[in-house]
Amino acid sequence: MKNKIIDFFKGFGIGISNLIPGFSGGTAAVILGVYDRFVTMFADLVSNFKETFKNCWSLLLGMVIGAAVGIFGITKLIGIFPVQTAFFITGLVIASYPGVINAIKQSGKITVVSIICFIFFAALIVILPFLNQNIDNEAFAWYVPLILLFLGALCAAAMVVPGLSGALILMIFGYFFYVMAHITNLVKGLITFTFDGYWISLISIFAFGVGIIIGLVLISKFLKKALAKWPTTVYMSILGILFASPFAIFWLIYNDADYLPKIQEAGVLGYIIAVVLFFVGIFLVYVLPKLLEKNNKAVEGEENN
């Protein structure tokens, strides 16, 4: 039971991280030491549902609840404190570099192909934000569900690939606020029994959800095989994404008109707090786990003596 509770909180962290632009469930899984298991879980969910669900139900439950909290929490936090949130997220991302670098060292020799993949994915994350165009939350046409289906699959890939969040994908393509608004509308409709424009939200989120399911299964299967055959190339690609993510985070936040007033109001104190939160992010991801590991080893040593 203890392991299930731990799995729940790990899943919660993975779920909530998918709503943070520039961060991802994959990054959280790497940090929490469950990345291989995380990928395998989705890869085997359809082909071996009963056994996979039995072993991972608490992790999945934590992810669902974490995602729900993230929708109404993290998105509001970014809107109210964009500067501080951007610095904190950047600290989290940068602190994950050593873990991925260590995985690269353990996976084998760095090849020309892996270096090319690193450059390609880093460049991709830098270029994509320039293509960002936000869609009106009230806009709806026959092709919107098809776009959301495609974006859902991409977001699913982002959940699995460290450093590339579903929120970042939606921001890049201009559908972040659209999807968040319609998820909020669905929840409010169920709570208050007001269903104005409900069918638009229902169709939009259904298409997005189907895309996520398809993407999770297909991308996870691919990554499971890729990690077994080309681990160095996969981790070098991940490092490229992580390396460029801070640029994407700051570009998307500082070039969004909705965040501009709050950024201008931040002032010197706001940036001091932001820098402090940057180092808090590094501490939580890099320093704290090392301290806990050291403490656990000390306790085990005393017990053995």
Image (cartoon, rainbow, N blue to C red):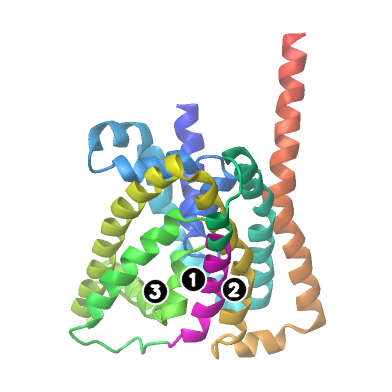
State the CA–CA distance, disc 1 to disc 3. 13 Å
State the CA–CA distance, disc 1 to disc 2. 8 Å
| Residue 153 belongs to magenta span | no
The amino acid type of the residue labelled 1 equals Leu
Q: Is residue 197 above or below residue 96?
A: below
Which of these two is toward me, 192 or 209?
Answer: 209
Query: Mark 1 and 2 residues: CB-CB less than 8 Å, in contact?
Result: yes
Q: Which mark is residue 180?
A: 3
Which of these two is toward me, 31 or 56?
Answer: 31
x 49%, y 51%: residue: 14
Q: Please indicate whether residue 210 sits to the left or right of residue 22 in the image.
A: left
Q: Is residue 75 above or below residue 105?
A: below
Q: Please indicate whether residue 115 sits to the left or right of residue 57 in the image.
A: right
Residue range corresponding to the magenta coloring: 117-133
The amino acid type of the residue labelled 3 equals Met
Looking at the image, can residue 257 be seen? yes
**Hey, which residue is sitting farthest front in the picture?**
112
Dot 2: what SS? helix
The amino acid type of the residue labelled 2 equals Ile
State the CA–CA distance, disc 2 to disc 3. 18 Å
Q: Residues within 10 Å of mark 2 (few under 14, many from 20)?
A: many
Q: Dot 2 corresponds to which residue?
A: 249
| Residue 128 belongs to magenta span | yes
Q: Dot 1 corresponds to which residue?
A: 168
Comparing labels 2 and 3, the label whose residue is closer to the camera: 2
Quadrant showing the C terminus: top right
